[in-house]
Image (cartoon, rainbow, N blue to C red):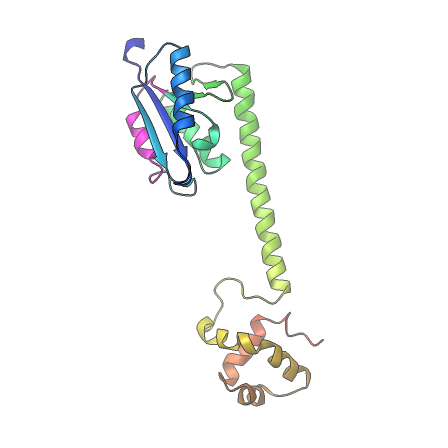
Amino acid sequence: MKGTQKHYGYCRVSTSTQDTEKQKFALLNYAHANKFQFTQIQEIVISSRKSKKDREINSLLTMLKNEDHLYITKLDRLGRNTKEVLEIIDELKSKNIILHIIKDNIIVDPLDTNPITTMFLTLLSAFSQMERDFISERTKAGLAKARNEGKLIGKQKGSISNNTQFEEHKEKIREYLNLGLSYEKIVKNIGVGSKSSLFSFVKHRANYFKAS
């Protein structure tokens, strides 16, 4: 069985101004030091924000078979975030693929319960949860800030495209409202929209149009 194992390398850089040579050199040095030859080294220039398919991760996972080895220089070459990295590692483990992370000197072997590797994956999992919590809190804070500033959040009832015609006039509209002018009079003064669309616009930006 050991003789049928294959060794695959994966190199990725994000932009065309970079190249994969440093990663490839590190992989080849590692192979030389450990006395094996690569079956294939996959090199790709693409942003980590792209899908697994575009980054050729999916085709690589399909290529890998039981007890094959996958080599990367750093963990961030593998996924766009910690959650995706963990998902890929789980998929590799389910297929009994041995993952080598060269820079960190970590080998993730599904059949090996090395305490250092276990601790590494546990910390990675905890970090993934922290990352999700941070994104969630940052999103909530952003939405709250937007609401406080009277910005339109998400798809609202009514015609958004019609309501946006009032955006460039909103300061004048607020001034007129503070003066007690009717919606009909305001629409006539600014020369756009209708009474009902202005009412909807003001309603969706209630915080902004509160009297000063």
In the image, is residue 44 above or below residue 209? Answer: above
> Could you tell whether 70 is left or right of 170 in the image?
left
Q: Position of residue 63 (x, y in %)?
A: 28, 27
In front of the other: 76 or 99: 76
Q: How many marks?
A: 0
In front of the other: 54 or 204: 54
- In the picture, residue 100 is in which quadrant? top left
Q: Position of residue 95 (x, y in %)?
A: 35, 23
Task: Determine the residue positioned at 64% across, 74% down.
Answer: 209
Locate the C terminus by quadrant.
bottom right
> Could you tell whether 5 is left or right of 210 in the image?
left
Task: Determine the residue positioned at 27% across, 13% down.
Answer: 4
Locate the N terminus by quadrant.
top left
Task: Determine the residue positioned at 67% across, 74% down.
Answer: 210
In the image, is residue 183 above or below residue 11? Answer: below
In the image, is residue 170 above or below residue 103? Answer: below
Q: Position of residue 150 (x, y in %)?
A: 60, 67
Q: Which residues are magenta?
A: 53-69
Task: Determine the residue positioned at 29% across, 29% down.
Answer: 62
Whether residue 164 appears in magenta in the rendering, the answer is no
